[in-house]
Image (cartoon, rainbow, N blue to C red):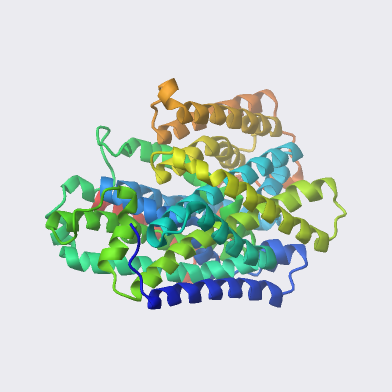
Amino acid sequence: MKLTIEWVDFSIILIYLVGIVGLGCWAGLRRRVVEGDAYFLAGKSLTWPVIGLALFSTNISTIHLVSLAQEGYVNGLAYGNFEWMAAFTLIVLALFFAPFYIRSGVTTLPDFLEKRYSPSCRDCLALISIISAVFIHIGFSLYTGAVVLRGLFGVGILWSIILISLLTGLYTIVGGLLAVVWTESLQTVILLAGAGCITFIGYQQVGGWTGLAGCVEPVRLTVLRSADDPCNLPWYSVLLGYPVIGLWYWCADQTIVQRVLGAKDENHARVGPLFTGFIKILPVFIFVLPGLICFGLIRQGKLPDTLSDSADTYAFMINHLLPVGLKGVVAAALLAALMSTVSGALNSIATLFSYDIYKRWLPDTPDRTLVKIGRIATFVAMVAAIAWSPFVSHFESIFQGISAVICYIAPPITAVFLWGVFWRRVSAAAAFATLCFGFALGFVVFLLDWFKESTGWNIPFMMSAFYLFVICSGVLFLISLWKPHAHTTESESLVWKDPLDALRGPAWRGVGNYRFLSLLLFVAMLLLYYTFA
């Protein structure tokens, strides 16, 4: 399905591309980022609005716009759980993890593991974090973006991957994290505006909520489903499995948490993620709901019944609902979603390789050399992601594919981070064993799933995450009891003696108080689930 597009739309897309690359390069060059903190953590100058917008922009990729619309068309609102459940884990990040990250002064999360456990834990996490950034954040995003560009403009998949890689890699390599978060903040606005256009126009044409409810099955309007629902996402797998992958993704993944590590102070580090949590309410309405609206409009006869492949749902709606000019805005939003995720992952890879691998073995490396090493690592990671991305087509659904891969990587990391900050007896030996064993076991499960036609593997990926987490937690607890941890003063300070201590830290007055915002977000999410469950 090739997009019918006018010169006005092409102009908007071109202006976006030139503007975003120019902004990223200018943001980096104006600060002359040759010092390590300035390049990798933006000089620890980030404020809560920038952190919140950048977190959201890095999280949302073309995968969300395209695949969530596809899931909305096929299954209704069920896969909106991946957006709304994120708000709860962002509260956990703001209350329990962000204070330790800021107080310990770490540059990377593997660095945090070394302070809490041991250097071997740091090495292990650094390696798996780089691999996950290349294969999950960049590889899936590049492939999805290429499929969209092929569907919209007829550009070949390989050429699309290379073009977006070059443009995104340019300003990421030049400007570092400062360039990334500046461009991500702008891209979030473009993304929300573009996606909102489709929802608004489609919602009006379908006849509002009453019109939509009248032409689709009631179950499509709910987010929590029974075990026999064909969407293969029963309510118990959401409640048991999502916290496992959500705690890794939002609280222990370098690509995401790096924005928090660059915070100006502890309050900005806390409020930024909460701001993201409020924004995460929107994707169900602007990413998932449009697919359901498309389904409703076809049933009403207001759109032609010519959608042969549900993967083309988003392109189908752009082509049939949007006027000239708005098509360019939404196409720019698609590029914004793609480029923001890729740039964020590239910067985290540069930071991980420079600080957790290169400088660990050559500790006297000057900052100027470290920045150069980070730029080289960025380039190499992009090449590796380009090579891997075509293999993403193996999965039946891109969104379910990326979710499954995360489910096999997350459990050991979640166990080590979660229990490590709440139970002081978790030992370095137990953490290292859990990481190694958990990654090996996850890889075995991944292979079973990849070759499931031969192996007969049929366990839902969300439940696989929960089972793997239980196993990893068991290994962690048993070895900790067998080989207790010898705490240092520093590692003692990275464990909550009382979970309520997380609520006693310094806080801004008024509505900016992180305690008030956490409660407000928690109540808002409960009300949403009550309404749509």
Evaluate whether residue 243 shows in this view: no
Evaluate whether residue 16 shows in this view: yes
**With respect to residue 188, does 253 lie above or below?**
above
What number of labels is visible?
0
Q: Is residue 324 left or right of residue 406?
A: left
Q: Is residue 62 left or right of residue 493?
A: left
Whole-percent x, y for residue 354 in the image: 75, 53
Q: Is residue 44 left or right of residue 520?
A: right
Q: Is residue 308 left or right of residue 174?
A: left
Who is closer to the viewer here, 365 or 275?
Answer: 365
**With respect to residue 501, does 452 lie above or below?**
above
Who is closer to the viewer here, 104 or 51?
Answer: 51
**With respect to residue 533, does 23 lie above or below?**
below
**With respect to residue 11, does 228 lie above or below?**
above
Quadrant in which the N terminus is drawn: bottom left
Question: Residue at position x 44%, y 56% from top?
Answer: 62
Dividing the picture into quadrants, the one containing residue 65 is bottom left
